[in-house]
Amino acid sequence: MSEHESHGDGHHAHHPHQAHHWDSMRQQFEAGKLGMWLFLATEVLLFGGLFCAYFIYRANYPELYEYGHHALDKVWGAINTVVLLVSSLTMALAVRASQVGNRKQLQAMLAITFLCGCGFMGIKAVEYKAKIDHGYLPGKLFNYAKTIEHEHEGHAHDGDHHDDHHGDGVAHAEGVFGAPAVSVVAPLEQTAQAQPAAPPSGLSASASRVAGDHAEHGHEDGDHGGHDGYLPVDGRPPNIHIFFSIYFMMTGLHGIHVLIGMAVIAWLLVVCRDGRFGPSYFTPVEIGGLYWHLVDLIWIFLFPLLYLI
Amino acid sequence: MAGSSITTALGDLGGLGSAGLAWLETRMVGLLAEGSIWTTGMPAAKSNHAGPIDSDYAFITIICTIFFVPITIALVYFAFRYKKAPGEKAESDVSHNTPLEVTWTVIPMLIVVVMFYIGFRHANMMYAAPADAYTVHVTASQWSWSFLHPSGAQMGGDIGKLSPDRKARETTDPDLGLHLPPGVPIRLVMNSTDVLHSFYIPEFRVKQDVVPGKTSSLWFTPDLPEGDEPDMYWLLCTEYCGKDHSNMLSAVYVHPTMESFLQWQTRATALDPDNPVESGAKLYVRKGCATCHSVAPDGSGPNTGPTWSGLWGLSADEHQVHEGSPTGPKRGVAMTGEAGEEYLRESIRNPTALWREGYIQPMAAVKVDDTELFFLIEYIKSLGKQ
Amino acid sequence: MNPPETAAATSTQVAEAPAVPNHYLNHSKGFLSWALTLDHKRIGLMYLVGVLGCFALGGIFALLVRTELWAPGDTIAGMFASPGSSPQEVYNMWFTVHGAVMVFLVIIPGVPAALGNFVLPIMLGAKDVAFPRLNLGSFYLWVIGALFFVYTLFNGGVDGGWTFYTPYSASQATNVIPALLGVFILGFSSIFTGMNFVVTIHKLRPPGMTWFRMPLFLWGSYATALIQVLATPVLGITLLLLIMEKTLHVGIFSPEYGGDPVLYQHFFWFYSHPAVYIMILPAMGIVSELISVHSHKRPFGYQFIAYSSIAIAVFGFLVWGHHMFTSTQSPAMNAIFSAITFSVSIPSAIKVFNWLATMWGGSIRLTVPMLYGLAFIFLFSIGGLTGLYLGTLSTDIHFHDTYFVVAHFHYVMMGSALIGMFGGVHHWWPKMVGRHYNGTLARISWALIFVGFNVTFFTQFLLGSQGMPRRYYDYLPRYEIYHKISTVGSYMMAAGFLIMAFYLLQSIFGGRKSPANPWGANTLEWHCTSPPPHDNFATAPAIEDCYDYSGIDYDAKIGGYTSRANP
């Protein structure tokens, strides 16, 4: 930019990355960091709206959460938590490496962080695919027919695998690393009659027509619906699609943030090759690290709220 | 000991405070009697809530005047008193005066505490209805009101129409609308079938949003009419609800005597089984059908829903009906068959099952018993003969 | 400090040609030098052009609305209705577009982004904002957001009111999603501007510019920027949730799918009430400058004014529930929100008293900016005092969603925020373009706007207390006379704004050249040339007491003021 050229020359020799309107690199670094903290505050508030919605609906419809969280795979969730924690450690080491000007270590740590990001998104994709296959989708995409069909499949699998491998009722599905993947629906004896699930209930009479005239089942208390990893459709609370709406919106928005963080790390990997980062200039690594830690932190809240309770 | 004496002192202070407020209130009621200069701008006061709200209004108006007039005088006076030629120095170089600033911080603070308190007290009187209140169930839909009385009498709203000279809005039928017995507290229990609406009668100073999925309520005791005729007011919708928001009105009548109210009730419930078409025509307005469906042969009038004129016996090609609702998940298959008995029955009792091409506004289910349904269908049939 | 002219010359490359002083407008040429500029002054000017253009657009819709309301029944909307639509649908789109454009495209970015960008860094003594590239990015986000609105206009309009209350907004078929996306993008523009200003004020204050030496406009802008950063993200997520509800029926705001429509109102007002202070606080900052500069007297109670800005920003976050007194909120919540709402009135009252005390004993020049300052105090007093009726629980039941509310927020949003902004435009115009506008025309225009405004909107208080609900296409004939008066007032305002457009444009080409300090101010932007040099300050400016007018003398020869300390 011509703006840069026209003033830089009049002054004493600047660091090449110091913009014209700053007096010192230190001032510039501190401003960048303050700016990033403010941005992180806005991110927290952005997610805050979703957390708020989570808690309000949890207060209004606790049965949705008690019921719905069994559809999520705690094992994959826990693995993903570890993956992100490790990436946070390597990101912190990367910042340290950039501060001391250790380019090799910086590259290695950024690369590991990036790979952890890939791993996280890969596991997320496996989890999403299972949800999509079984019809556990947000809002109007929630597929009542598929979830019922899936329950029957679970019933068929029950004889084969249930007792052999997973006494806790988690059936087998294939995951990338051969680990137990998706905890699928296993039925209870009572569901042999296979009553249809309760569709969205509300004002619209048309909605209840979608699945026939069985909307009243929402009133039955799902006393057997909330334990042991079972997701029987019998006794399923009405409006169960809201749980999956919140699950997909929270993890989806978080996933987008992971992708943005990975793009930042990839960019850092590209530009750090010229050795530009050192004790006098490491702002991009530092604020990229701050962003990554925030993404990590949000997951630390998402995991227990969605998967465990 | 010390603790208890402090509590006593606080209690005394509280007593003094409430005594002071009570004194203020009596002064206010005297000063702010209806029609005083301080309630200028408010509409006629016609319910038990109007007095307290108008006295609060007057109190705030007095406070505002006390602040606004000196501010404006100072503004204009200073602007001319201290107007000077360019370059002349200011007469004063005072930068601050802490006692003065603290004063004009604390005094408004005390005033707003009083203001909050009176508003809070009077609003609290408006929440819980007396136990003996006469309860009417109000249903709000886009864009009509419907009133269901304990007697089973149901009436649609009367949206009225602009007189030809555009100088008045005239009611269309004195039996339509919200009819209220005299001298008893009225409690309205309200539901919405679609979007947000709000129930507002300016003369009664009552307003309450009607929220779909929730039940809201309000109460008031209307003033007795002075003459022998019922008093008429307009009920207005004050929460934006779409196209005909501004036409979501209804006439409200307060009867002068119980007798007059009971006469209306008899008329409102009467249907003549020997004359099904005429009974159907009555139901057409009482059940609120008239808000959306026209019956005029030239199709003039409301057009939110299909006209009933010539509807009977339309072939499938002519009226293009589909399964599902236009906004619902299933935009469906064209139905075969003509607009006959079965189709009308389904469309009245379960209106979102079928929808007609070109009409996107879904209709709320209408509660009708079998006799009423028969009358309505007979009425539609009679409109079909061209 | 060097004389400003010399300072400008030494910092430029055309010092050898002093006949054409180098300034930010002629520093570089060509479309790209503007489109890709990182100079806060050029970005501010581009914002100003965009904001004023959108103001004209929103104003046209306001006039359409007012004309339609001339008489009950169809007046003009029927002429604009296409075969498939009805006049009331046309009218509903008019007021929706008017509200959304004025709030999101004009008032929110008006003072902070347009005037703030131009003035804030110079006033502070900085060369630029902290993140110039982010600043340009904010501007382009604003442009993209505006394009989304333009798209909805040419694609059949948008319905629902600027508040987009659910479930109506979630169920109707107009262009709600493009409009929401536009607002979402504008939100990020606003967030980035706010971040930039907070960091600029924290980190780019030159040595000597302590917090309590900052001009009051900077305090107002700082408080505004904090709200922009802390409230706007919540609007962002709310709009995303509404878009999800519309497209996927996720069951969050629509009762039809298990959601709660009142939750949307809580989310929406958690942003939009603080947003009211995004609009008014910087205007209050401008007025604090205008009153002090044109009275040539230091602001009375500087610290009270500064703290009251911060107090308003903090309290502003706690009062959103007062928009929901009749929306089935519990009585206890109503009481709490009402009580906190009254606490916001105190800092506002303090400011009014302090402005009056600033005028007392001053040396007042009734310049055009000062006239706008006086108009602001008058209109803001009415707007603020009528807020008391709406904060009081009992009276709000009667006034909620009537024209009383419409009149109240027009007094605050237009009568205060926009009049403050136009005061700022008239105050800094000679600095921005280096030329004076025609004072006589400006006074005529001011009078038309001031009188027309009161005729339009004071009438609406009467309409509202009589019970006229807002957003009505048709109305009971008993309200007709008030609507007629109000419409006449709006035409007076329109005439005033047309005159303003004329003399401002005319001044660019034929206006008298402005000296560096035409008003006798002492804040830093008046120490550099008009228009300012590209880099604001070649050498770090000496920071003095910016409200000490004792050393500022009038020089009739140049038609402006000179500083004795820095001749």
Image (tube, coloured by chain):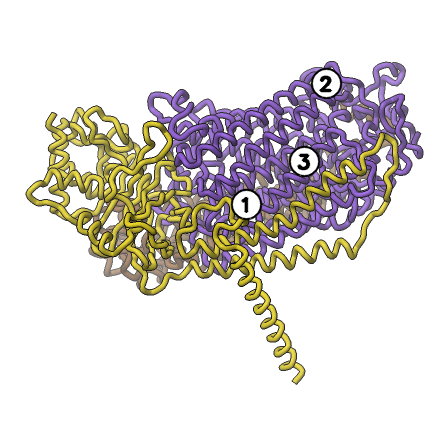
Chain colours: A brown, B yellow, C purple
Identify residue type, mark 3. Ala
| Same chain, labels 3 and 1 | yes
Horizontal placement of A244 versus C136: left or right?
left
Q: Earlier in the sequence, mark 2 or mark 1?
A: 1
Q: Which quadrant of the view contains residue C382?
A: top right
Task: State the CA–CA distance, disc 3 to disc 1.
Answer: 34 Å
| Same chain, labels 2 and 3 | yes
Q: Chain of mark 2?
A: C
Q: Residue at x 28, y 58 (%)?
A: A219
Vertical relation: C494 (above or below) C312: above
* Of residues A120 and C407, the one drawn nearer to the viewer in this rendering: C407
Task: State the CA–CA distance, disc 2 to disc 1.
Answer: 42 Å
Q: Quadrant of the N terminus of chain A?
A: top right
What SS does tag 3 mark? helix
Q: Which residue is mark 1?
A: C234
Where is residue B197 shown, x and y percent of the image? Answer: 38, 44
Nearer to us of marks 3 and 1 is 3
Confirm whether residue A92 shows in the render.
Answer: no
* Of residues C338 and B270, the one drawn nearer to the viewer in this rendering: B270
| Same chain, labels 2 and 1 | yes
What SS does tag 2 mark? helix
Local packing at callout 2 (Cα closer than 10 Å; few below 14, some 14-19, many 20+) is some
Vertical relation: C35 (above or below) A216: above
Q: Earlier in the sequence, mark 2 or mark 3?
A: 3
Q: Which residue is mark 3?
A: C375
Identify residue type, mark 1. Val
Q: Chain of mark 1?
A: C
Horizontal placement of C315 versus C545: left or right?
left
Q: Earlier in the sequence, mark 3 or mark 1?
A: 1
Identify residue type, mark 2. Ser
